Image (cartoon, grey):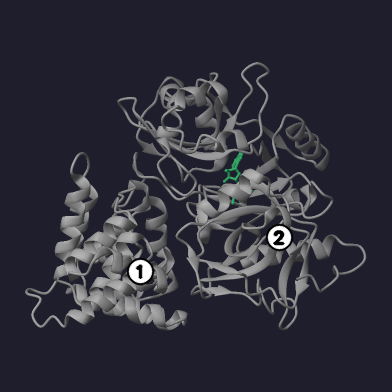
Amino acid sequence: MRFADLAAAYEQLESTPKRLEMRRILTELVRPLRPPELPYVLFLSQGALRPEYEAVELGVAASLARRAVARATGVPETTVAQRTESNGDLGTTAYDLVAALHRLDAGEPLTVEAVYRTLRDIAGATGAGSQDAKVDRLTDLLARASPLEAKYLVRFVLGTLRVGVREMSLLDALATAFADGSKEARGRIEAAYNLSSDLGLVATALVEGGLPALDAIRLEVGRPIRPMLAEREPTLAAILERMGGSAALEYKYDGLRVQAHLFEDGSVRLFSRRLEEISAQFPELRRALPAAVGRRPAILEGECVPIDPETDEIRPFQEVSRRRGRKHDLDVAQEEVPVCLFAFDLLLLGGEPVLHRPFPERRRLLAEALRPGEKVRLADQRIVRSLEEATEFFELALAEGAEGVVAKSLAEGSGYRAGARGFWWIKYKRDYTAGLSDSIDGVVVGGFHGRGRRAGRFGAYLLAVYDPARDRFETFCKVGSGFDDAALAELPKRLHGRERDARPEGVESGIVPDRWFEPGLVLEVRGAELTLSPVHRAAQGAVRPGAGLALRFPRFTGRIRDDKGPTEATTSKELLSMYQAQVRQATSGPPSAGAT
Ligand code: ATP
């Protein structure tokens, strides 16, 4: 495929807000493709070169990309910088500058394959002289590019490809282009993806062997599986009822979810909830795990929590998050913030996948396989058969520093559901404010200038929930409470590069902030209650025509959800069920309307 065709498809995708139309464009884009081009296009369209867990980074800073644009078009770097300053996008600058050259013959047209390979080379260049090598290769590509190709090449390199293609849309396109587009086909493709986290692998199998070939994709050590997630219920009684009268209750540790992959030779790789490799952050876990689990290869999941070395008590989660970016003084971090992994699930043991087995069996295998020590322990669990037992265990969990409990089904069908949120696991957290019992993870889509002590910074942020069915981010609150000075200084840094002058594609809001942000950063908030709102757009129309859901008295908990991407934030549907649960609980009818 010519790269020009891919760029043209991106141009079309960018200009259509309609999901069905996007799906049609994507389907037509992938239909003629075969491996190896097909995986290349799938990865490129997600703004990546390989599956996210491989963390292949291009390592091209904006200054390097500017230099390449300048060199390829023969325009001084200062001019490139100035134009970009005023139009806000180096991709647009590249488009304009290449168009102004009126190139008649740029030589051989660029192909997707050639572009992909060059980008891999750019990513692979490391060490002394690598910066120059990266600029040289990018310059070569740009010198051969049409205006549109240049625009999307530059945006890709900078990580600002705004075509809004998410993996779920790509799965839809694959199901239509290479199977019959039915729900069943889509489900099988998604299941293979949830197991392997590698769209390229799934697409290749599908094209080469049809749907049956997907069954050959297995859980493998070193390749993270998309995590199983929990539903909510408003009371422990409702949980027990849902689970048929009995359940395994476990402490809900408030830490960082870790998926540990143990290879036969004792080496270990650790992945976060969003499947980023975090091995480097926890060297002590990499050392402790092989001693703790003798039967390898193995994959287990647990929550990594800071522990007070003197009292053995669970510490606040924030202490673990401070480890971010402290690659150089990890030794200090290990001493200051020792962590413990509380293992709660087992997916593969002795090379054998066990994820399909019922939860009680997985737990038994985990307990048998694990030699608990200081750094790796088994999650506290109790089988409960009455509300009294459940309440007692919940109170014990809170007293010992957990944030609540996760109830797990004991039923025959309680196999591990990769990538799915369902009632096989139900979480129940402490009720902090006598308000909403659960926190909400909102995506930052806007910022408001602060006043007084906050002058010159953002004083509040506009947050949205995600609607996967429509692929939209819908606002539900403006939050200004709960930010300390450190957070107020940190957030703009985290949002750098996401600023937009206009409302980003896919964001729905009745409020216009001082600055828009491309959805990316996720913050955890709590609030008093959910109300109907004329200006917020979350689950709009679901309760009353025209009205969206809003969070009253929102407050930032201090926790930046680095472990979640924007599409992993709380969904509109979850917000709606939290609203419904709250209405059911209220004795005096539905909560008041009118929050903004
Ligand atoms: P939350 O913000 O409530 O942690 P989440 O969206 O990250 O939610 P959920 O699946 O909704 O994830 O809630 C379960 C989460 O609780 C897991 O992702 C995991 O990080 C954490 N957790 C802590 N202890 C346990 C446990 N014993 N079993 C399962 N998950 C646990």
Mark sitting on residue 56: none
Answer whether residue 452 is visible to the viewer in this image: yes
Above or below 450: residue 381: above
- Residue 462 in percent (x, y) is at 64, 64
Above or below 41: residue 542: below
- In the picture as drawn, the residue positioned furthest to the top comes out as 310
Frontmost residue, 100 versus 273: 100
State left or right for residue 266 relative to residue 330.
left
Above or below 346: residue 34: below
Where residue 382 sits, quadrant-wise, is top right
Answer whether residue 408 is visible to the viewer in this image: no
Mark sitting on residue 451: 2
Where residue 400 sits, quadrant-wise, is top right
Q: Residues within 10 Å of mark 1 (few under 14, many from 20)?
A: few
- Residue 590 in percent (x, y) is at 85, 69
- Residue 303 in percent (x, y) is at 56, 36
What residue is shown at x 70% (from left), y 64% (from top)? 577
Residue that label 1 marks: 82
> What type is the residue that disc 2 sits on?
Arg
What residue is shown at x 47% (from left), y 49% (from top)? 274
Which quarter of the rendered image does ligand 1 occupy? Answer: top right
Mark 1, secondary structure of its residue? helix
What residue is shown at x 60% (from left), y 29% (from top)? 306
